[in-house]
Image (cartoon, rainbow, N blue to C red):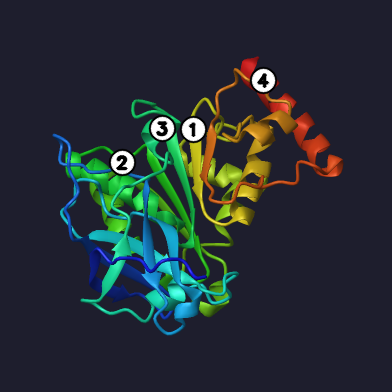
């Protein structure tokens, strides 16, 4: 028996198609969320659940998915989401295949309670003085856009120089919010570096190339450090914390490349596999809906070298 149909409680107020497979959806709930004294109704980095009923194939029932919020907590409604169409879904009833048929004015389900701890407050803390290296693959930029927008809604002259957004996509047209973020580079000191993995198909692109995790490859990390004014070898947990939102491969590769620097993941099973002391604070955080570790912790050929690198990295930090 299919699940009970969702009762729609929100309206798709506006849809902006950036490409055939990327769009901004702005959704207005029927009941406005309660706000705190500062005008915020969630914490930047959190997500909401969007849902739709499959009217064409009612036997498949409804589908719901968690989506990071791109708008700032202090923004007026509607709520903004940055979503990619999943061309090869694992589900028989993929949300984006239903969502892409919706137009402005259509009804939709939105769970009105935000959730998640992928926030500055819940990871490193709002007062942490280190660089915040925000690593985004594709639409993984949404929570980070929310973070910088929130800082500016609270203070339009906010110093964003501690925020470093590294955003990767296949093509330059896939770098959503890029113009907005480049504006913050000029006005508020944000550090933003976009990179494309298929530069041959982007003839006008003159920026970085490669997947976003390639910023941390041994041969390229020094270039990133130079851009941040850290000096070669200067990017460590003493100077930076890393937050990642993207595919499993992006998270796993970034983690592997930063382990020699002593970066410790906020993931209990990986910490234990790598022999990280329980009291060692995490310095690398990521948004993950899958509970499986991003590296194969059951494979000694994978774990043992990383365990040795982790021990060496932590020893160097404490020396």
- Label 4 and label 3: CA atoms lie apart by 21 Å
To which residue does mark 4 refer?
A: 277
Element type at marker 1? strand
Name the one closer to the observer, 96 or 165: 96
Residue 302 visible? The answer is yes
Which residue bears the numbered disc 3?
122
Q: Quadrant of residue 304?
A: top right
Height in image: 261 above or below 94? above
- Residue 204 in view: no
Q: CA distance from mark 4 to mark 1?
A: 20 Å
Q: What is the number of the mark on residue 240?
A: 1
Dot 1 alpha-carbon crowd within 10 angstroms: few under 14, some 14 to 19, many 20 or more: many
Observer-side mark, 2 or 1, equals: 2
Number of numbered discs overlaid on the protein picture: 4
Report x, y in % for residue 58.
44, 79
Q: CA distance from mark 2 to mark 1?
A: 21 Å
In this picture, residue 301 sits left or right of residue 6: right
Asked if the residue at tag 3 contacts the one at tag 2, i.e. Cβ–Cβ closer than 8 Å, the answer is: yes
Tell me the element at label 3: helix
Distance, label 3 to label 1, CA atoms, is 16 Å
- Pick whichever, 262 or 3, lies toward us: 3
* Classed neighbour count for the residue bearing mark 2: other residues with Cα under 10 Å, few (<14), some (14–19), many (≥20): many
Q: Residues within 10 Å of mark 3 (few under 14, many from 20)?
A: few
Task: Note whether 298 is above or below 234 in the view shown.
Answer: below
In the picture, the disc for residue 219 is none
* Residue that lies at the very extreme toward the right in this rendered image: 301
Give the mark nearer the N terminus: 4 vs 1. Answer: 1
Q: Outermost residue, front direction?
A: 1
């Amino acid at each position: 028996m299919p699940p009970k149909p969702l009762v729609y409680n929100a309206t798709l107020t506006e849809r902006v198609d950036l490409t055939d497979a990327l769009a901004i959806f702005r959704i207005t709930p029927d009941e406005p969320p309660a706000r705190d004294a500062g005008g915020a109704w969630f914490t930047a980095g959190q997500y909401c659940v969007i849902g739709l009923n499959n009217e064409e194939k009612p036997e498949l029932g409804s589908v719901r998915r968690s989506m990071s919020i791109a708008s700032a907590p202090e923004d007026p409604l509607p709520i903004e989401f940055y979503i990619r169409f999943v061309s090869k879904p694992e589900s028989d009833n993929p949300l984006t295949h239903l969502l892409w048929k919706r137009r402005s004015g259509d009804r939709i389900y939105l769970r009105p309670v935000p959730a998640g701890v992928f926030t500055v407050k819940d990871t490193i803390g709002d007062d942490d003085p280190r660089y915040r290296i925000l690593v985004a693959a594709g639409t993984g930029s949404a929570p980070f856009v929310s973070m910088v927008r929130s800082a500016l809604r609270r203070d339009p002259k906010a110093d964003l120089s501690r925020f470093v957004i590294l955003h990767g996509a296949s093509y330059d047209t896939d770098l959503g919010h890029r113009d907005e973020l480049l504006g913050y580079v000029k006005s508020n000191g944000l550090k933003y570096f976009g990179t494309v993995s298929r530069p041959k198909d982007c003839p006008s692109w003159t920026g970085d190339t490669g997947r976003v995790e390639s910023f941390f490859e041994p041969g390229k990390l020094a270039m990133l450090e130079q851009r941040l004014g850290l000096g070669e070898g200067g990017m460590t947990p003493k100077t930076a914390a890393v937050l990642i939102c993207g595919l499993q491969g992006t998270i796993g590769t970034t983690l592997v490349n930063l382990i020699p620097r002593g970066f410790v993941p906020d993931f209990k099973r990986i910490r234990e596999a790598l022999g990280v002391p329980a009291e060692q604070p995490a310095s690398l955080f990521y948004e993950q809906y899958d509970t499986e570790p991003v590296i194969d912790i059951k494979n000694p050929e994978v774990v043992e070298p990383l365990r040795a690198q982790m021990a060496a990295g932590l020893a160097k930090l404490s020396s």
